Image (cartoon, coloured by chain):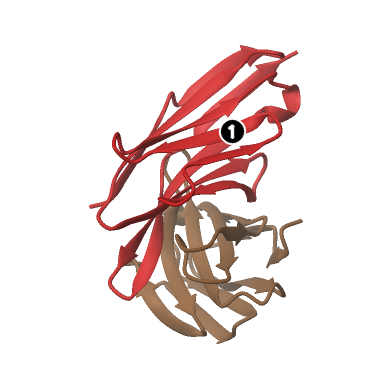
Chain colours: A brown, B red
């Protein structure tokens, strides 16, 4: 248990659906992240929020829309996804910016787009 | 573009063996190198190495950062089946006012009884 909780753990959605992934941490961390992990590929950084402000959008398609209402919660809203978006989506948090302090990861959401 | 390369990509050993996992990097404005263990889903933090802390040890695991060679190794001695996992290397670098982690593809370690 890392202190970072993601829901749901598994999600199957059609290409026309809208769904949201949720992440929460009560570690007192100030930075939160979304990563995508596909088979045989490195973890890809998608979004970074620092003190609720988005500080990085790593050229992610607009069908992925993040939301950070407060420092403890992070959402990833999904709509009109493609089958190639199927992957493990990991949320992480860190006290300071990643690289200055270690990041703690949630269990991830295994997303399948059909 | 920042790059992190891990080798080998996969490794099979027997319990009791010692393994060495490698990570090399090319990044601008290096800040730190981190090792994670990923067993099922959540990567769990192992070590963070910086210019001021180039060697870390915890039980059977140890890691060294070689800033001259731009690389790091993770050693596991007396391996156990519970060490079977994917080992991820990530490098932290400054990006202006921010910093970010770049991950390697990971090394899949299988420890056979």
Q: Is residue B29 left or right of residue B66?
A: left
Quick check: A17 above or below A13? below
Q: B94 or A35, which lies in front?
A: B94
State which quadrant residue B57 falls in.
top right
Quick check: A33 above or below B73? below
Q: Is residue B18 left or right of residue B107?
A: right
Q: Position of residue A11 (x, y in %)?
A: 64, 59
State which quadrant residue A44 falls in.
bottom left
Can residue A81 be spotted in the picture? yes
Residue at 44%, 51% (x, y): give it. Answer: B50
Q: Position of residue B36 (x, y in %)?
A: 57, 44
Q: A25 or A22, which lies in front?
A: A25
Q: Chain of mark 1?
A: B
State which quadrant residue B40 falls in.
top right
Element on which disc 1 rests: strand
Work out which quarter of the rendered image holds the N terminus of chain A and state it.
Answer: bottom right
Q: Is residue B98 left or right of residue B55?
A: left
Question: Counting other residues with Cα less than 10 Å from the Cα at mark 1, is it few (<14), some (14-19), or many (20 or more)?
Answer: some
Q: Position of residue A53 (x, y in %)?
A: 45, 85
Q: Position of residue A30 (x, y in %)?
A: 56, 78
Report which residue position mark 1 lands on. Answer: B62
Residue at 58%, 71% (x, y): give it. Answer: A95
- The residue lying furthest to the bottom in this view is A69
Can residue A13 be spotted in the picture? no
Q: Is residue A16 left or right of residue B71?
A: right
Give the number of callouts. 1
């Amino acid at each position: 248990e890392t202190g970072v909780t993601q829901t749901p753990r598994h999600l199957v959605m059609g290409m026309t659906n809208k769904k949201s992934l949720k992440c929460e941490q009560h570690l007192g961390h100030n930075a939160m992240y979304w990563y995508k992990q596909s088979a045989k590929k490195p973890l890809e950084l998608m979004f970074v929020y620092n003190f609720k402000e988005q500080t990085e959008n790593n050229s992610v398609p607009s069908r992925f829309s993040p939301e950070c209402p407060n420092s403890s919660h992070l959402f990833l809203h999904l709509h009109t996804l493609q089958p190639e978006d199927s992957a493990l989506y990991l949320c992480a948090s860190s006290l300071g910016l990643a690289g200055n302090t270690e990041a703690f990861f949630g269990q991830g959401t295994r997303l399948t787009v059909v | 573009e920042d790059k992190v390369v891990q080798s080998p990509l996969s490794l099979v050993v027997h319990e009791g063996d010692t393994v060495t996992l490698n990570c090399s990097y090319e990044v601008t404005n290096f800040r730190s190198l981190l090792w994670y263990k990923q067993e099922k889903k959540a990567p769990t933090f192992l070590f963070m190495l910086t210019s001021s802390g180039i060697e870390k040890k915890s039980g059977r695991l140890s890691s060294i950062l070689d800033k001259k060679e731009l690389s790091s190794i993770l050693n596991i001695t007396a391996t156990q089946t519970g060490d079977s996992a994917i080992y991820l290397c990530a490098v932290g670098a400054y990006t202006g006012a921010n910093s970010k982690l770049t991950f390697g593809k990971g090394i899949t370690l299988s420890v056979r009884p």
